[in-house]
Amino acid sequence: MAVRVELLTVGDELLRGDTANGNATWLGRRLTEAGAEVTRSAVVPDDLEVISGAVHDALTRADAVIMTGGLGPTSDDMTREAIALAAGVTLHRDPDVERNLRERAAARRVPLRPDALRMADVPGGATLLPNPAGSAPGLRLALPDGVVYALPGVPSEMRAITEESILAELGGETVSAAVLRTATVWESVVADRLAPVEAMAGVKLAYYASAGEVRVRIEAEGTDRLAEAEAAARDLLGSALYGDGEVTLDRVVHGLLAERGATVAVAESLTGGLLGAELTAMPGSSATFAGGVIAYATPLKHSLLGVPEDLLAAHGAVHPEVAAAMARGVRERLGASYGLAVTGVAGPEPQDGHPVGTVHVAVADSGGDVWTRSPGLPVAADGARARAGIRQMTAVHALDLLRRVLLDLQATDPWPGWAEDREEPG
């Protein structure tokens, strides 16, 4: 049976929303991969009694608790004291940790603040977990009902200690799993299409939606069953499936361009450089990314990209023919094999009579062919969230259109025929 683990992240900043709880996300994924069963995740404030109570509460359900945060040198770092309170023990100062703290300060030629020595305080009976990435060691303390692990909140330190000192102890039988990634299709539509796979005995699916994309995690009892489920899912997802595992859409596009010895240049309006940022995130992207033009103002679409003035006068900046002209113009001016362009209305107000969410993307090749897509994106209630979401979804649609052109999918499947629902937020 897998070890049951609860996660307990400590910090007022997490409850206020000032800091994203990335540690819990990473721990949940990594522990699951190692074969542990993560049963619950909670966030508690920097309060001694609350933290101690949460530890006791978690151990009534789980075999182990992993805590992150609260091991630093400041007055609001209370995890050590809380663990000691939960265990009914006192703190003592570990001489080896104190010596290490003093040596690190001396090597950096900075004075050691007295508060920093709090990081050498250890609950009675606790085992120190070496921290190869920082100052504060992790802690392991066995209580009558289970084991408590305390880790620093700094992500790099938390991950290093977990990898070196915790996974081997908590890990069990590795889960057989695969991740498939789709673009421009809503989560509910993906789930509906994969219903036959979900109905397979010994198979479990989980869906993770983000702006314009859906990841599907497939778990199965054994590698043979996983292979069967994955093959069925791939067949059902068809051209909406762009990759698997940790691969990203920009990497897929770069790979396809590299196979053809081709390059791409981008012309951006509403995305304001986001598309170029996506295409330069991968190391070595300069081999296939020529550059980009941010023609945000309408006159610049003519002066920089050669969009005909009469076209802009007749339709404004938000039109599929304008996107096509932008794609042709940036390809020619930057000497790329393909031009990729986006224009539209990110909001919060309509533009030239076009509602928020009106988007047009286009790809032009060196042979004079142009492909366009006008997805009509959903709008969130929150104006700022809507704007950011539309910009991100536009970048995904643009990259996916280029992928389809490079794979010659536009001729046979210009749009996933089963992704007709345009109402669900993506």
Image: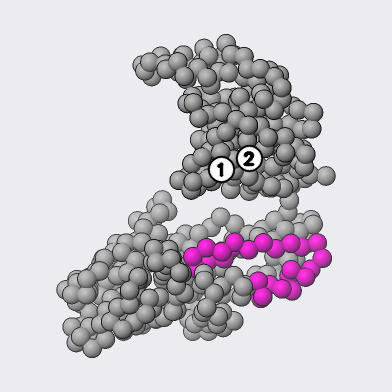
Q: Where is residue 295 in the image (x, y as percent from the top left)?
A: 24, 69
- On the question of residue 40 being in view, the answer is yes
- Residues at circles 1 and 2 in contact by the CB criterion of under 8 Å: no
Q: Which of 415 and 166 is in front in this view?
A: 166
Q: How many other residues sit within 10 Å of disc 2, few (<14), some (14-19) or many (≥20)?
A: many
* Depicted 102 relative to depicted 224: above or below: above
Which residues lie in the magenta part? Answer: 191-216
Q: Nearer the viewer, residue 277 or 243?
A: 277
Residue under the image location 30 percent in, 78 percent down: 351
Residue under the image location 22 percent in, 79 percent down: 307
Q: Which amino acid does label 2 sit on?
A: Leu
* Depicted 273 relative to depicted 162: above or below: below
Q: Say whether residue 197 is magenta.
A: yes
Q: In whole angstroms, how far apart are the C-alphas of marks 1 and 2?
A: 10 Å
* Depicted 411 relative to depicted 60: above or below: below
Q: Where is residue 208 in the image (x, y as percent from the top left)?
A: 59, 61
Would you name the residue on which mark 1 appears? 23
Q: Where is residue 163 in the image (x, y as percent from the top left)?
A: 62, 36
Secondary structure at numbered mark 2: strand
Would you name the residue on which mark 2 appears? 8
Residue under the image location 53 percent in, 38 percent down: 11
